[in-house]
Image: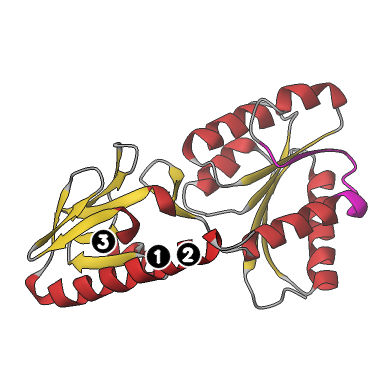
């Protein structure tokens, strides 16, 4: 059904090895029945899970609440401080933790045993989410992962291997990454244009294109490479016409 579209990366953390193996077995069953690709890893403590998250981009975590040492709720709070993208499903045999668990943004809460009837709908829901076009750019810095809605990005500048995301609310996000990491996702979106080797802009927030520079709605000036001026001017003109046609079509509907 979903085979070949993407690989869902899942981590399961439970100090009860029998429960851990049971959930991993059900995930294997889901993969076979749905004909989808899963990449699953199991952990028997939250410390090992947190260490893995430092270098693995999981889509979904099945996280036991009651574990010795660092429990699931504490681990989830640490994860949320660095990554708001990962979906979290709490697993526990203790219903009294349900209310507390919702203090941490989570996808769901399941009582053990986590049956096929409960697990499969959650996995189906996540698969649907992963297949939808992204409306936000996922940005990874050294110690956290965050999302920036495309429409909130005014332009991006790179200086000495540091990226600066200038946002429409006047704020700036700074990460030590290369522009080339995000170019494919940004340039695939309508309205984004590379105007200089160090600048990529969202034409939605450009008010004027001049020889050598453009102006944004916030009054910022962004340089345009001499060799790119004609291409940028053409792209901006076409974007304005497309935007006007879209607005006209929308306004004509009852």
Tell me if residue 99 comes above or below residue 217 in the rendering. above
Element at label 2: helix
Residue 19 in sight in this render: yes
Q: What's the distance in space between the residues labelled 3 and 2, CA to CA? A: 28 Å
Q: Is residue 90 above or below residue 56?
A: above
Side (left or right) of 172 relative to 83:
left
Disc 1 secondary structure class? helix
- Is there CB contact under 8 Å for labels 2 and 1? yes
- Residue at (61% x, 34% y) in the render: 76
In this rendering, would 90 be left or right of 76? Answer: right
Q: Which residue is mark 2?
A: 248
Q: Nearer the viewer, mark 3 or mark 1?
A: 1
Q: Position of residue 180 (x, y in %)?
A: 30, 66
Q: Nearer the viewer, residue 111 or 13?
A: 111
Residue at x-position 20% and y-position 55%: 158
Query: Which residue is disc 3 drawn over?
Result: 200
Q: Position of residue 176 (x, y in %)?
A: 27, 49
Disc with the residue nearer the chain's start (3 vs 1): 3
Point out which mark residue 108 bears: none
- Magenta region includes residue 109: yes
Magenta stretch? 106-118
Pointer 1 local density, CA inside 10 Å: few below 14, some 14–19, many at least 20:
few
Q: 107 and 169: which one is in front?
A: 169
Residue 181 at x, y = what percent? Answer: 34, 63
Q: Which residue is mark 1?
A: 244
**Residue 17 percent coordinates (x, y):** 79, 45
Q: Gap between marks 2 and 1, in whole Å?
A: 6 Å
Up/down of 106 relative to 203, above or below: above
In this rendering, the label closer to the viewer, 3 or 2: 2
Q: Nearer the viewer, residue 65 or 108?
A: 108
């Amino acid at each position: 059904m979903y085979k070949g579209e993407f690989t869902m990366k899942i981590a399961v953390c439970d100090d009860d090895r029998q429960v851990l193996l049971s959930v991993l077995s059900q995930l294997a069953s889901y993969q076979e029945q749905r004909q989808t690709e899963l990449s699953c890893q199991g952990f028997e403590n939250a410390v090992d899970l947190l260490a893995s998250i430092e270098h693995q981009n999981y889509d979904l975590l099945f996280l036991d609440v009651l574990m010795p040492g660092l429990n699931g709720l504490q681990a989830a709070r640490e994860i949320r401080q660095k990554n708001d993208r990962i979906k979290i499903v709490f697993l526990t045999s203790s219903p009294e933790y349900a209310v507390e668990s919702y203090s941490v943004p989570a996808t769901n809460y399941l009582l053990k045993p986590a049956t096929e009837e409960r697990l499969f709908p959650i996995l189906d829901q996540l698969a649907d989410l992963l297949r939808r076009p992204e409306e936000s750019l996922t940005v990874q810095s050294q110690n956290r992962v965050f999302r920036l809605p495309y429409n909130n990005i005014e332009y991006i500048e790179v200086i000495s291997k540091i990226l600066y995301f200038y946002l429409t609310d006047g704020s700036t996000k700074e990460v030590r990454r290369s522009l080339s990491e995000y170019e494919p996702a940004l340039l695939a979106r309508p309205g984004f244009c590379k105007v200089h080797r160090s600048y990529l802009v969202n034409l939605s927030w450009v008010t004027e294109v001049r020889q050598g520079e453009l102006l944004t709605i916030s009054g910022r000036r962004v340089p345009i490479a001499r060799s790119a001026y004609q291409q940028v001017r053409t792209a901006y003109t076409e974007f304005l016409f497309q935007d006007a046609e879209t607005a006209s079509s929308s306004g004509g509907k009852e």
